[in-house]
Image (cartoon, helix red, strand yellow):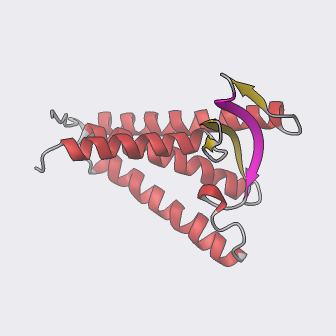
Amino acid sequence: MITVSIRGRKKQMLLCALIFAANYALDRVTKHIAIVCLKGQEAFSFIYGSFVLTYAENTGAFLSLGRNWNMFLKYTALLIIPIIICVAGLIYLMFKETRLYRLITGACIIGGGIGNLADRLMNEFRVIDFMNFGIGSLRTGILNVADLSVTFGVIVFMIFELKTKPS
């Protein structure tokens, strides 16, 4: 497996910022469209029901984990600590990371993470979800583009990590 190193701090910072911004912006735009077009509407089903668009608000984390926690615990575990981790992660990616795949996947993960954290911060802890995938009764939870960014980033990161020899 070939690993590509990043040369030049400015290029590294720019690439990280662009990938982060693209993931964050796509999440924000699609959530706005979901609010405008899907809120209060019946679900839309495509490709024989394998892709469904439906509006939902999640007051917890992954699959509503923590939705019933007290507000101190929710703010600490689902907002403050993740924001600190995301900011620290961005700083690390911009200034320390030397492997291109780690920078790209990290920026995708953090861009998606910040997208959902922004929802929590601006929408009284409600994260906008609107997509559901599956075949028959085998389905995902209702999710959003931020969730896809995080999932894509984690999967690609794991694939590269498993195929890359330690240096």
Quarter where residue 135 is shown: top right
Along the line of sight, which residue is nearer the eye, 116 or 84? 116
> Residue shown at 31%/33% (left/top)?
11
* Image coords of residue 107 (percent x, y): 42, 43
Work out whether residue 98 can be spotted.
Answer: no
Quarter where residue 37 is shown: top right
- Looking at the image, residue 21 sits to the left or right of residue 120; the answer is left
Total numbered labels: 0
> Residue shown at 45%/46% (left/top)?
109
* Image coords of residue 20 (percent x, y): 47, 40
Along the line of sight, which residue is nearer the eye, 150 or 138? 138
Q: Residue furthest top?
A: 47
* Image coords of residue 84 (percent x, y): 49, 64
> Residue shown at 74%/28% (left/top)?
45
Region rendered in magenta: 49-58
- Looking at the image, residue 81 sits to the left or right of residue 30; the answer is left
Q: Residue furthest front?
A: 136
> Residue shown at 59%/46% (left/top)?
115
Work out whether residue 130 can be spotted.
Answer: yes
Q: Residue furthest right?
A: 40
Quarter placement of the N terminus: top left
Is residue 138 part of the magenta span, yes or no?
A: no
- Looking at the image, residue 155 sits to the left or right of residue 136; the answer is left
Q: Name the dominant secondary structure of the magenta segment.
A: strand
